[in-house]
Image: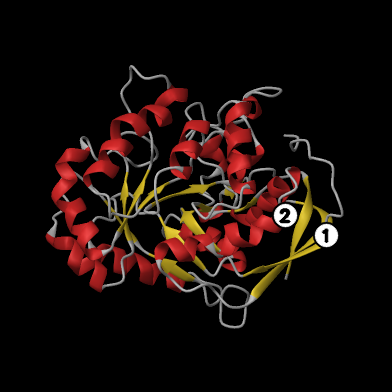
């Protein structure tokens, strides 16, 4: 898959030093898969919001704390890059999440609950069928200062796949913001012009994460030279006009937008099956891909705040200390990497030359 065209470079730097960043949307799975993929993220990021859509889902504080211990056990060994990585835990919101669970979760350090509309994406079968069923829980979250993270797509089969995010804004986000004005909401992995415009004007309690792959590619990437399953994700890549709107959003420097990779590992055999899993595995070169996207619109000077400042500020957490450095140094991202139980996993852009490289 070819990289997108770049804007003319004007006195672009050959190195970029960023405050150590965080990933505000990450999937690391569990068990052997977790052990395989976590070091890629820990090498680049100090913290990450860990998604709770395991099977079975992480719906209670006790389950989240147990999952956190498994993640900590999978970190690189002491003295290696990423040994101090910290997971930020979330709960999976369901129609039946008790409001009483929220104070318990807050006291235990859980930072957010994730809204998956039932059937919207991977392991979302237990998700919310009607957001009004969760209002007592949302009220408790607003009171306790626990964030709501939303997968912003409706699942009505009558709505076209490429319109689901825009319809979600009208049917879910607007009533949600009206009914819970003090609840902090992150519109995850936005993909459309409508979402970028909505978040930019929605007020200080609404923000959004944006992935590297939605900044780099439009929906043509899924079909170039044949079906490209490793470019298939949910929400799906959209038209070029939407990609350009996302690039404009991050280039604006607005603090409403921050980094969330949505790196989603699946074994290659599952991605290349007749019915493939949704998700792009970007963790091995996440910062390199973001740097490429920001450079394409002459916005490398905005990357540090996007990656390292806006997210902590919205979550009410301190900014990290320390730095990471990217160097303009072409290198080949491996086509395939080891995965759980002798399987293989293929990162997005695997086998291609990337223009930026993280310096160890």
Judge whether 108 appears above or below 267 on screen. below
- One can see residue 178 in this view: yes
- The residue shown at (38%, 33%) is 153
Q: In this view, does 137 lie to the left or right of 283?
A: left
Residue denoted by label 1: 13
Q: In this view, does 241 lie to the left or right of 315?
A: right
* Closest to the observer, 343 or 237: 237
Residue denoted by label 2: 300
- The residue shown at (84%, 42%) is 8
Judge whether 238 appears above or below 182 on screen. above
Q: Is residue 74 left or right of residue 14?
A: left
Judge whether 309 appears above or below 185 on screen. below
Quadrant for the C terminus in the image = bottom right
Check disc 2 and report its element: helix, strand or loop: helix
* Closest to the observer, 286 or 239: 239
**Residue farthest to the right, as pictured:** 11
* Badge number at residue 56: none
- The residue shown at (58%, 39%) is 246
x then y, percent, for residue 164: 40, 27
Judge whether 23 appears above or below 10 on screen. below
x then y, percent, for residue 110: 31, 66
* Tag 2 near tag 1, CB within 8 Å: yes
x then y, percent, for residue 172: 29, 35
């Amino acid at each position: 898959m070819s990289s997108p065209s770049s804007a003319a470079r004007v006195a672009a730097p050959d190195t970029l030093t960023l405050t150590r960043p965080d990933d505000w949307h990450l999937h690391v799975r569990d068990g052997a898969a977790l052990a395989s993929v976590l070091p890629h993220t820990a090498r680049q990021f100090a913290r990450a919001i860990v998604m709770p859509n395991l099977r079975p889902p992480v719906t209670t504080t006790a389950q989240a704390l147990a999952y956190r211990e498994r993640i900590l056990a999978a970190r690189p060994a002491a003295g290696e890059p990423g040994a101090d990585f910290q997971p930020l835990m979330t709960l999976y919101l369901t129609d039946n999440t008790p409001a009483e669970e929220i104070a318990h979760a807050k006291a235990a350090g859980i930072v957010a609950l994730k809204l998956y509309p039932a059937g919207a994406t991977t392991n979302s079968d237990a998700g919310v069928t009607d957001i009004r069923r969760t209002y007592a829980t949302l009220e408790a979250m607003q009171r306790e200062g626990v964030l709501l993270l939303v997968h912003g797509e409706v699942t009505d089969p009558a709505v076209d796949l490429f319109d689901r995010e825009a319809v979600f804004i009208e049917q879910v986000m607007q009533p949600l913001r009206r009914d819970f004005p003090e609840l902090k909401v992150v519109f995850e992995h936005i993909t459309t012009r409508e979402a970028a415009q909505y978040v930019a004007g929605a007020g200080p309690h609404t923000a959004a994460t944006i992935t590297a792959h939605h900044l780099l590619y439009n929906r043509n990437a899924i079909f170039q030279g044949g079906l490209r399953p490793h470019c298939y994700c949910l929400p799906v890549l959209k038209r070029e006009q939407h990609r350009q709107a996302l690039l404009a959003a991050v280039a604006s420097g607005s603090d409403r937008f921050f980094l969330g990779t949505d790196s989603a590992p699946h074994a290659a055999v599952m991605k290349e099956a007749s019915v493939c899993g949704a998700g792009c595995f970007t963790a091995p070169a996440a910062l390199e891909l973001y740097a490429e996207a920001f450079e394409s619109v002459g916005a490398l000077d905005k990357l540090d705040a996007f990656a390292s400042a806006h997210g902590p500020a919205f979550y009410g957490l301190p900014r990290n200390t320390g730095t990471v450095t990217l160097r303009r140094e072409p290198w080949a991202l491996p086509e395939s990497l080891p995965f759980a139980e002798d399987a293989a996993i293929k990162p997005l852009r695997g086998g291609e030359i990337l223009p930026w490289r993280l310096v160890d």
